Amino acid sequence: MVRHSKNGFADIPPHSENPLNYAVAQRDKHTMRMVREALTHQQAILAYQPVMRASNPDKIAFYEGLIRVLDETGRVIPAGDFMGLAEEANLGREIDVAALHLGLEALRDNPGLRLSINMSARSIGYSKWSNLLRRYLALDRSIGERLILEITENSAMMMPEVVANFMEDQQNQGVCFALDNFGSGQTAIRHFKDFYFDILKIDGQFVRDIANDPENRTITAALLSVAGHFDMLTVAECVETAADAQLLIDMGIDCLQGYYFSAPTVHPAWMAKEPKKSAYGR
């Protein structure tokens, strides 16, 4: 039913002036609701992608655990479909809690596993996340020695002093840190002497088609030089072809990650049974 204003003209809902914006807003609202429900009902899992050694590309250096949620039909939803929205809200912290808990459980249950888990700077001061990390590190010291925490370049630069202090504390527990998506943000080189990153992951935009793109080769060579100066292990993200992999090896990369080697999977070879779903708040 169309409502009319006092002047006799039909009242038009604001969103009808731009139906595309309205459709996008509704889609985003549905996505956030779906993620909240998935976290509430522990419908989150990790997909594992191997990171290969450049010195022997058949050997796995470690795995990255990538958060996934299940929708109401049981369909697996990748992080790319919701992380951008979640990072703008407190929901991003709950996603970090879920990912950390699932990763720590995997490390506890698989003594030979070395695993990286994504986090953001906002979670450092979140007691639910920090208490969870503290509890598992106290439970088994080997967990800290096999855990890698990945922080994106943009997240690290939000609060560099807080991140640096946190890294120093956790490295005393054996935890390693990776700077994710390096080259995509605004990291000031002056901060590198304050950070304690062990691993530098070169952003995929500079890796894709590097065998045929001289500009990407130049940028990647510069990033490798920075990593070498600060004695950081290097990982090339988004390696998708044999030619790209070989060129990166020839350039001196330490590790390679991407679909050329394996897509992320919720059923890695070392997992003998279905991924465990548990209440990550406990």
Image (cartoon, rainbow, N blue to C red):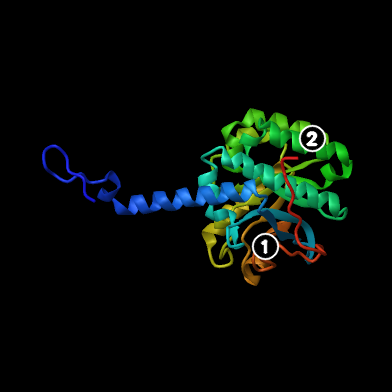
Q: Are marks 1 and 2 in contact (CB under 8 Å)?
A: no
Residue position for label 2: 134
Placement of the C terminus among the 4 image quadrants: top right
**Residue 142: x percent and y percent?**
88, 44
Residue 277 lies, with reference to residue 196, above or below; the image says below
Quarter-wise, where is residue 45 in the image?
bottom right
Q: Amino acid at mark 2?
A: Arg
**Residue 32: x percent and y percent?**
52, 48
Q: Amino acid at mark 1?
A: Pro
Residue 129 lies, with reference to residue 260, above or below; the image says above
Helix, strand or loop status at disc 1:
loop
Identified at 52% across, 48% down, the residue is 33
Number of the front mark, 1 or 2: 2
Identified at 66% across, 29% down, the residue is 162
Residue position for label 1: 264
State the separation of the CA atoms marked 1 and 2. 28 Å
Q: Nearer the viewer, residue 247 or 191?
A: 191
Helix, strand or loop status at disc 2:
helix
